[in-house]
Image (tube, helix red, strand yellow):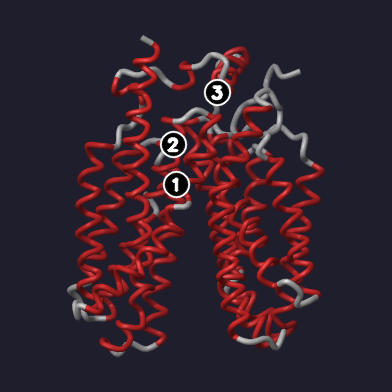
Amino acid sequence: MTDNIDGIVRFYQKRVFLSIFIGYSLYILCRKSFSFVIPYIQHEEHLSKEDLGKIVSALNLAYAISKFAFGILSDNVGATLLFCSGLITTSASVLGFAFVKDVKMFTLLWFLNGMGQGCGWPACSKLLRKWFQKEQFGTWWSILSASMNITGVITPIFLQFFTLSNGGWRSFMFFCGILSIAWASLCVFTVIESPEIVGLPSFSDNNPNSAAAKKKKDDNLVGAKKSTLSDLIYSPFLWLLSFYNLIFFAAKTSFENWIQLLIVDEKALTAGHAVAFISAFETGGMIGNFATGYLTDICVSKMPNSKSSPRMIVVLVYMVASVLALQTLTTSNAALPLVAFVLGCSLYGNINLFGLLATESAPVYLSGTSHSIVSLTANIGAVIAGYPFSVLAHSYGWLGVFTLLEIGCAACLILALVTKNFCTKIGVSSVKED
């Protein structure tokens, strides 16, 4: 009987995960579709750089707002509804984009796209939390995170097909919109909200020896006091994660936007060196995303009763690697591709982990709010890495900017070492703890 139940569980896990994996890949396709066709739009529609900037900024602004808002809303609204409605919204905006010509309409539709995008990851994280045990959570989280990298590899091939067949960028956008709407409609039926809906036991009850079951037992002993938003806000670990995420996301965004200027203008190397650096950085990021969950799940399985999260061991390793790689980057030109690979792996890996920890360390009914707060600080880091860093570079050069990032990552490392024995529960009252 148990084997039969396990088989049914695995069937639904695969069904739900495959649905949201492809679905989130389509979220990313819709989000990046404009970036892929910018050269074609600029040529055919005669848009200025300022026009293109307005369209891009509209999505970024809406995404920052919606991801925070829907992260909180995900604690009160079904994840399936949130996931499907968000994908339909963003798909509709891409579909509409294929038929309009006015810059104002382009901007409005891309703002709508950004609003729909904010539904995607909060819903995915909630579904993963409900369908997978804590010992598996990190692995599946990381695999799902890698869906955005896969989209980035496959999409240019599709785009080339449409441009070579003279379909143009509008046909490409139309295809993206139709494909995403069709998949969102299918997900309404394939994405199941939780195991209980199909008559399966909650995963916290499946295995009495699992970390989740032990946590539930401990919570009951504490007095079954349900955590509140105030408990969440006053949790020190939440704000540690938020600070770490701000610094590391600012660093990642700086490498995406400014590293070519550092390499070509200040290090006096060739554009080829810059391209090689970026390629190595993104490759490291993909591997970091894949490896992070697997490595940290091993740590969790080895230390299920640890007061602090075993995943913090990998966080510390990534922090050390980031500081050493940044030190090498700012002081020499040696082994730049290797430095780039290490930076991509450690920065992407830690950003992945901060979101994972924010989600799993909070009670399931507050996990969306917890993740949205940590994600908001990442968006603040991205903003800081933009115009403020460009002003700083005007006075101190890009080398000064990356030296500042090195200091920031070193500060995170010192803080993480000092607080390594802190309790990593978020939003859980500590009454009756000895």
Image coordinates for residue 336, horizontal then vertical, percent? 69, 72
Quarter of the picture containing the N terminus is top left
**Residue at figure coordinates x 22%, y 75% from the top left:** 170
- Distance, label 1 to label 2, CA atoms, is 9 Å
Drawn side of residue 236 relative to residue 31, left or right: right
Sequence-wise, the earlier of marks 1 and 2 is 2
Q: Is residue 197 left or right of residue 240?
A: left
Amino acid type indicated by mark 2:
Leu
Q: Earlier in the sequence, mark 2 or mark 3?
A: 2
Q: Indicate whether 310 appears above or below 195.
A: below
Determine the secondary structure under disc 1: helix
Alpha-carbon neighbours of circle 2 within 10 Å: few (<14), some, or many (≥20)?
many
Residue 86, image x, y percentages: 31, 51
- Which residue position is annotated with label 1? 144
Residue 109: image quadrant is bottom left
Mark 1 vs mark 2, foreground winner is: 1
Closer to the chain start, of discs 1 and 3, is 1
CB atoms at circles 1 and 3 under 8 Å apart? no
Report which residue position mark 3 lands on: 212
The local secondary structure at tag 3 comes to: helix
Residue placed under numbered mark 2 in the picture: 128
**Mark 2 and mark 1 in contact (Cβ < 8 Å)?**
yes
Secondary structure of the residue carrying numbered label 2: helix
The part of the image, by quadrant, that contains residue 117 is bottom left
- What residue sits 77% from the left and 52% below the top? 413
Residue kind at label 1, given as amino acid type: Leu
Give the residue type that dot 3 points to: Ala
The quadrant in which residue 114 appears is bottom left
